[in-house]
Amino acid sequence: MKKAFRIKKNEEFSMIFNKGNSVANRQFVLYVLHKEGQTHFRIGLSVSKRVGNAVMRNRIKRIIREWFHQYEDKLLQDKDYVVIARKPTAEMDFFEMEKSLVHVSKKAGVFLKDNR
């Protein structure tokens, strides 16, 4: 995932939180904001210190970025996504996180229609 496709600024996070739609399950909260004319989606990640130490938080962020990389061609491109990881993610492996992210993404309706 290129750094140009990441959301870093606090103002951008605030705009997505205020104007976007949110969907959640026990492990993740996904905020989605439609951006007209955007050719590639952008992602922002938030993992609280309550989830674990720095090593654990960075591991969770790497897994989430890898998931977005794997599902890049199946997701709607004109969106900004913010993923908030909740505490149960600390005990999950990659495949459990993948399943949970697919679940929350389907709830949000961000998959392309021809890829189910």
Image: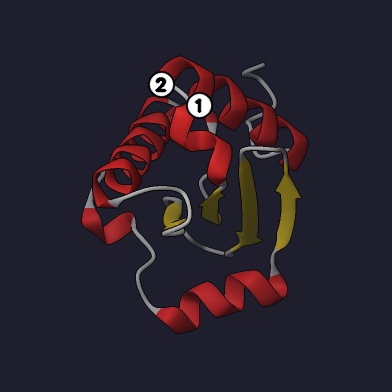
Q: Quadrant of the N terminus?
A: top left
* Dot 2: element: helix
Which residue is identified by label 1? 97
Marks 2/1 in contact by CB < 8 Å: the verdict is yes
| In front of the other: 34 or 56 | 56
Alpha carbon separation for disc pair 2 and 1: 5 Å
Instruction: Give how far across and how far down residue 69 sits, in percent.
Output: 35, 32
| In front of the other: 97 or 109 | 97
Q: Is residue 52 left or right of residue 4?
A: right
Which residue is identified by label 2? 94
Q: Quadrant of the C terminus?
A: top right
| In front of the other: 104 or 54 | 54
The residue positioned 38% from the left and 77% from the top of the image is: 9
Instruction: Give how far across and how far down residue 43 sits, in percent.
Output: 43, 54
Which amino acid is tagged 2? Phe
Which amino acid is tagged 1? Met
Q: Quadrant of residue 49?
A: bottom left
Can residue 46 be spotted in the picture? yes
Q: Residues within 10 Å of mark 1 (few under 14, many from 20)?
A: many
Vertical comparison of 68 with 23: above or below: above
Taking the view exactly as shown, the residue that stands out farthest to the bottom is: 11
